[in-house]
Amino acid sequence: MKKLFASLALAATFAAPAWAATQTVTLTVPGMTCATCPITVKKAMEGVAGVSAVTVDFAAKTARVTYDPRRANAAAIAAASTNAGYTARAIQN
C-alpha cells in the first residue's frame, strides 16, 4: 500500500506542470468590419502555440483568449492577429 501511495505521489509531482494555471486576456480588434472577419482573427490567434481557446465577439470587436503563459503571451497573440490583417491590442482585465 505504501508503494501505491508513493507511486501516486511521484506521478502527481511530474504531472503538476500540466496543471499549471492558464491566463485569459481580452483584446480589442477594431478592424473587424464583416461577419467573416472573426473567423480569420480566431484562426490567427489559435495558431499561436499555447493558446487553448479563442472567443471572438464581432459586435464588441473583441477577442477573449485563454493561453498557457509558459508558451504564449498577450503580445504574441495580438501580433498574430495583426499579421493576419486585424490590429489587436490587449485590454486590461
Image (spheres, rainbow, N blue to C red):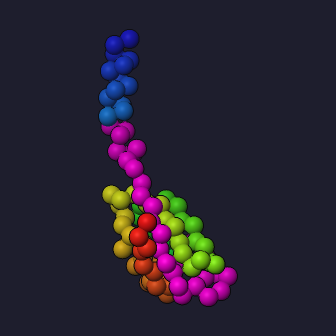
Question: Looking at the image, which residue is at 60% across and 82% down?
Answer: 37
Task: Give left or right: position of 26 versus 8.
Answer: right
Q: Nearer the viewer, residue 24 or 69?
A: 24
Relative to 36, 75 lies left or right = left
Q: Position of residue 85 (x, y in %)?
A: 49, 87
Which residue reaches farthest right?
35
The magenta segment: 14-43
Across and down, in percent, residue 75 comes to: 36, 74
Q: Residue furthest top?
A: 1
Residue 35 in picture, x, y percent from top left = 67, 82
Looking at the rendered image, the quarter that the N terminus falls into is top left
Residue 63: x percent and y percent? Answer: 53, 72
Q: Is residue 50 magenta?
A: no
Q: Is 45 placed left or right of 20 in the picture?
A: right
> Based on the displayed image, in which of its 4 quarters is residue 33 positioned?
bottom right
Regarding residue 4, the answer to whether it shows in the image is yes
| In-front residue for pair 11/57 | 57
The quarter of the picture where the C terminus appears is: bottom left
11 shown above or below 93: above
Instruction: Decide: is 34 above or below 7.
Output: below
Q: Say which quarter of the image contains residue 5.
A: top left
